[in-house]
Image (cartoon, rainbow, N blue to C red):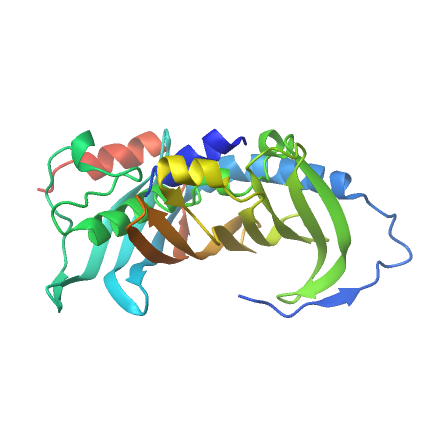
């Protein structure tokens, strides 16, 4: 993913686990990083279809902070159901607070707003003229990074695991380790092209199922100074981590997602962003997405 694609993805919205090195069993043939990730890609491609049979609840906390002061915080529960385009989230509960004139104002519903006007927005789509910039930022972050219509509730372009995404990345096998009670391959990755502004990071792959247990990413390169100066935007420390776990039928699903980074826009708007999301209460359904959508749209009698 080139810089433009990465920047569009990011600007559209604007655990550390103990491991121990494990030797490979002598009876197992040695696998290269590319061979391991090829199996992961096949499983991820298959999982994308299998995840469309699940309904679940996503619990999310998104915070915009300036220094140590929380400017806006929203905690939400959303019911995620499959749809023809991926999935759609139905907001079940919202607890929000926003700092205004030195006091926190609480709210429990999404605002009714008109379509944004370009002249009133900065380069991350956040209104800065009406005092609600932090709420706009929090809601855009949640909507674009974790409620992006993907079947697993995460922005799909953040983790290069599918066969299509893997084509642009180089993988290196660091070794075998123990994580979350599982034997895993530790693989690091980065873009093949040195001038790409994609993701670098670490993937911990279950040695038996060839499914990701933990994936952590960060920007492969810093945004060039000239670009930061021209756009007035910088994203130091941008990175994401996601934990996966299997469902009873063997389908692996992201169970938690997190990030914390700084956002600086137009030279005067600076915030720390925190996102912590958990997928819970999974239910497998054999009903098609079309029927689910029809039922959700039908009026109650």
Q: How many marks?
A: 0
For image coordinates 49% across by 52% down, the residue present is 240
Residue located farthest toward the right when viewing the structure as drawn: 26
* Image quadrant containing the N terminus: top right
Vertically, is 298 above or below 188?
Answer: above
Residue 258, image x and y in percent? 45, 57
Q: Between 72 and 241, which is closer to the camera in this rendering?
A: 72
Q: Nearer the viewer, residue 235 or 105?
A: 235
What residue is shown at x 28% (from left), y 56% (from top)? 77
On the rendered image, what quadrant is the C terminus found in?
Answer: top left
Q: Is residue 93 visible?
A: yes
Q: Is residue 150 left or right of residue 66?
A: right
> Measuring 13% from the left and 68% from the top, which residue is drawn there?
102
Q: Position of residue 123 (x, y in %)?
A: 30, 37
Q: Is residue 247 visible?
A: no
User: In the rendering, at what x and y percent does residue 107 appear?
Assistant: 13, 60
166 left or right of 69? right
Location of residue 177 (image quadrant): bottom right
- Seen from the viewer's position, the closer of residues 267 and 60 is 267
The answer to whether 286 is drawn above or below residue 70 in the figure is above
Residue 257 lies, in percent from the top left, at: 45, 55
Q: Residue at x 65, y 30 (%)?
A: 167
């Amino acid at each position: 993913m080139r810089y433009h694609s990465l920047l569009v993805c990011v600007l559209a919205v604007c655990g550390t686990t103990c491991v121990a090195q494990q030797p490979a069993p002598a009876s197992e043939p040695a696998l290269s990083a590319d061979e391991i990730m090829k199996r992961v890609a096949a499983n991820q491609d298959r999982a994308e279809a299998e995840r469309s049979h699940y309904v679940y609840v996503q619990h999310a906390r998104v915070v915009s902070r300036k220094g140590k002061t929380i400017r806006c915080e929203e905690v939400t529960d959303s019911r995620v159901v499959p749809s023809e385009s991926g999935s759609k989230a139905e907001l079940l509960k919202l607890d929000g607070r926003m700092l205004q004139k030195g006091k926190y104002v609480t709210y429990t519903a999404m605002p009714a707003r008109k379509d944004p006007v370009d002249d009133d927005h900065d380069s991350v789509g956040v209104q800065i003229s009406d005092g609600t910039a932090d709420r706009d930022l929090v809601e855009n972050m949640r909507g674009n990074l974790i409620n992006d219509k993907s079947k697993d509730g995460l922005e799909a372009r953040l983790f290069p695991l599918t066969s299509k995404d893997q084509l642009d990345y180089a993988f290196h096998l660091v070794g075998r380790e123990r994580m979350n009670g599982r034997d895993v391959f530790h693989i690091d990755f980065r873009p093949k092209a040195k001038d790409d502004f994609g993701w670098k990071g670490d993937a911990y792959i279950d040695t038996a199922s060839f499914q990701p247990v933990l994936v952590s990413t960060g920007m492969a390169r810093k945004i060039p100074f000239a670009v930061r100066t021209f756009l007035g935007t910088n994203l130091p420390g941008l990175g994401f981590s996601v934990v996966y776990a299997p469902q009873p039928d063997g389908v692996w699903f992201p169970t938690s997602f997190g990030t914390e980074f700084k956002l600086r826009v137009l030279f005067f708007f600076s915030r720390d962003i925190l996102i912590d999301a958990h997928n819970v209460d999974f239910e497998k359904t054999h009903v098609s997405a079309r029927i689910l959508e029809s039922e959700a749209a039908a009026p109650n009698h």
